[in-house]
């Protein structure tokens, strides 16, 4: 049975392959992709903020308002 050191020496990471980590395209294509920006991240952040706001409004109208004034 081989030791763990032998298995590490035989293993080649996917990060060593250029096709797994490099962008295959021209400089113009890369600039076009970068110009679009992180739209997906902005969409996820916007949806999460909208969900939190909706939950806060639901708490306000269904829990706080029916209890009435304090004091």
Image (cartoon, rainbow, N blue to C red):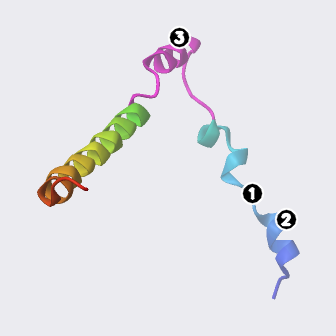
Report x, y in % for residue 66: 12, 58
Is residue 38 highlighted in magenta? yes
In space, the residues marked 1 and 2 are separated at their CA atoms by 8 Å
Q: Are marks 2 and 3 in contact (CB under 8 Å)?
A: no
Circle 3 — which element?
Answer: helix
Report x, y in % for residue 20: 60, 43
Q: Main secondary structure of the magenta part?
A: helix
Q: How many marks?
A: 3
In the picture, measured across the screen, residue 55 lies left or right of residue 1, that is: left
Q: Residue visible at 34% across and 44% down?
A: 48
Q: Are marks 1 and 2 in contact (CB under 8 Å)?
A: no
Quarter of the rendering occupied by the N terminus: bottom right
Nearest the eye: 20 or 30: 30
Q: With respect to residue 55, does 3 lie above or below?
A: below
In the picture, measured across the screen, residue 17 lies left or right of residue 7, that is: left
* Circle 1 residues within 10 Å: few <14, some 14–19, many ≥20: few
Mark positioned earlier in the residue sequence (2 or 3) = 2
Q: Are marks 3 and 1 in contact (CB under 8 Å)?
A: no
What residue sits right under mark 3 in the picture?
Answer: 28
Report x, y in % for residue 41: 43, 36
Nearest the eye: 58 or 9: 58
Q: With respect to residue 69, does 28 lie above or below?
A: above
Q: Residue visible at 34% across and 35% down?
A: 46
Report x, y in % for residue 16: 73, 46
What residue sits right under mark 2 in the picture?
Answer: 9
In the picture, measured across the screen, residue 68 lies left or right of residue 38, that is: left
Q: With respect to residue 43, does 63 lie above or below?
A: below
Q: With respect to residue 43, does 51 lie above or below?
A: below
Q: Residue visible at 85% across and 82% down?
A: 3
The magenta segment? 22-39
What residue sits right under mark 1 in the picture?
Answer: 12
In space, the residues marked 2 and 3 are separated at their CA atoms by 39 Å
């Amino acid at each position: 049975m081989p030791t763990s050191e032998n298995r590490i020496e035989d293993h080649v990471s996917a990060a060593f392959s250029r096709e797994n980590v490099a962008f295959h395209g021209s400089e113009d294509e890369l600039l076009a992709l970068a110009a679009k920006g992180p739209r997906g991240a902005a969409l996820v952040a916007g949806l999460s903020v909208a969900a939190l706001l909706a939950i806060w409004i639901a708490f306000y109208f269904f829990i706080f308002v029916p209890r009435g004034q304090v004091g």
